[in-house]
Image (tube, rainbow, N blue to C red):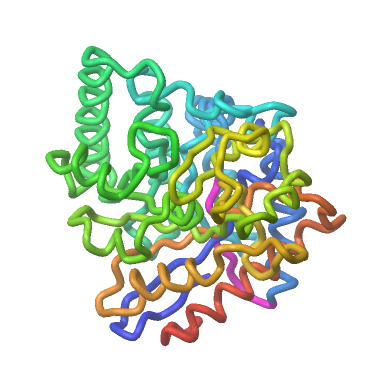
Amino acid sequence: MRLRHPDGSTVHLAYCTNVHAAEDLPGIHGQLSGVATRVRHLLGVERLGLGLWLSQHAAADLLARPEELAGLRERLTALGLEVVTLNGFPYRGFQDEIVKYRVYTPDWADAERLRYTLGLAEILAALLPDDVTEGTISTLPLAWRAGWTSDKAAAVMANVDAVAQGLRALTGRTGKVIRLGFEPEPGCIIETTPQATALLSDVDHDYLGLCLDACHMAVGFEEPGAGAGSGLPIVKLQASCALEAPPGAQRALAAFDEARFLHQTRSATGYADDLGEALAGGLPADESWRVHFHVPLHDAPLPPLATSAPYLRAVLDALLGGEPPLTRHVEVETYTWNVLPGAPADIAEGIAAELDWMRGQLAALGLKET
C-alpha cells in the first residue's frame, strides 16, 4: 500500500513474505497468487506491497534466467502486488523445523553474503514499479557476536565497503537507487542503534544505513526515538511487536518456547540468548521480561502477558510523525505465525488484520492512502 505523508512524500507499507516457506520460484509464485492475493482482497486495496524474501536458491535462479525475472515482475503487476523492498537477512531455510543461530550465516565476513546481497539488489532494481526509483534491502547486523576477532572485523568492513561500491555501480547502470539497511538485533555485533552509530559512522551513507526493527529495539530497552537521533539514514522500518511478561508471571511464556527460532530475552539487568535459557533461571524473576518473539501487531496474548504495541506506536511517531518522515519503507514482519500458540488456520486473515491495524496507526499520524 502507498500512503501520502503530510509533507507530500510517499510512504510504502508492505508485509514480509519470510512468513512463507517457499524456497524456489514455483513456491514463490504460489504464495503470490495464494496468501498475498487473498490479503489484498481482504484489505480491499487495489495494490498491496510485499517485502519479498528470496532464498539464495531462488535469487540465483532469477539471476540465471532473465525471462523468469521478467515473468515475476509481470505476475506481480497482474495480481495487484508491488515490491519496493526485500528482506535479505535470512539466506535460506528460514521456515525449516530448526533455524535458531543458522539465520546469522553466512555473515558479512563471508564473500557469499556480499554476492547474495548484490544479487538481490539486481533483482530489486528489475522488480521496482515504473514510477519508483528507490528500493531497499534489509540485512543482518554484520554477524553474531561469537567468534568476533580483529581479522573478522576487517573482513566484514571490506565486504561492507564492497557492497556500497556495488550498489553505487548499479545506480550508474540502471538509474535505480537500492539502499541497504543493517538491522540491529540482540546478541549480534550490532545490537542497538548506538552500536550501529559507532560501527557504521564512516560507511557510504548514500547507500548504507539502518533497518530498524521495533521488536528488537523494545527487547533492547532502547528509547523509541533512538533511531531518529542516530545520525544514520533509516532506510527501512520493520513494524513488529515483542512479547512482554510482568514480574513473577514469566511462567506464562513457556507456551512460546519453541524450537524453530531464536528468542533472545532481556530484563532490565539480565540477558539470555533464548527463552528456554531464561525460563531455566537465566533471568531475574522480579523484573519484567521482553522476548524477541514477533507477535501480531493487532492482537494481544492472554493476560498476564502483553506486547510492545505501545512501544511500536512511539517508534512510528518518532520516525513518521514529523516532516520529513525519517523513513519511507515500512514492513510488517510477523514471521512467527506458524509457531504461535493457537495459530489461526488462515494466516491471510491475520496478516490482513495487522496491515489494517498499521494503516490505522499511520492514519492517526496524518498519512492518507493513495
Q: Where residue 210 sits in the image (x, y, percent)?
A: 31, 49
Identify which residue, 235 or 174, lies in the foreground.
Answer: 235
Q: Is residue 25 visible?
A: no
Image point (72%, 31%), residue name: 259
Query: Horizontally, is 318 left or right of 205 in the view?
Result: right
Q: Where residue 131 sits in the image (x, y, percent)?
A: 38, 65
What residue occupies the far left of the structure in this picture? Answer: 202
- Which of the 4 quarters of the picture holds residue 167? top left
Identify which residue, 139 or 44, lies in the foreground.
Answer: 139
Query: Horizontally, is 172 left or right of 337 in the view?
Result: left
Against 263, is 61 above or below? above
Q: Where residue 283 sits in the image (x, y, percent)?
A: 56, 40
Identify which residue, 267 or 357, lies in the foreground.
Answer: 267
Total labels: the figure holds: 0
- Provide the residue span drawn in magenta: 44-52
Q: Where residue 341 sits in the image (x, y, percent)?
A: 80, 50
Query: Horizontally, is 290 left or right of 110 in the view?
Result: right
Q: Does the magenta stretch include residue 231?
A: no
Q: Can residue 153 be seen in this view?
A: yes
Image point (34%, 69%), residue name: 319
Image point (33%, 56%), residue name: 134
Against 327, is 153 above or below? above
Query: Horizontally, is 154 left or right of 234 in the view?
Result: left
Image point (30%, 56%), residue name: 234
What residue occupies the far front of the structure in this picture? Answer: 286
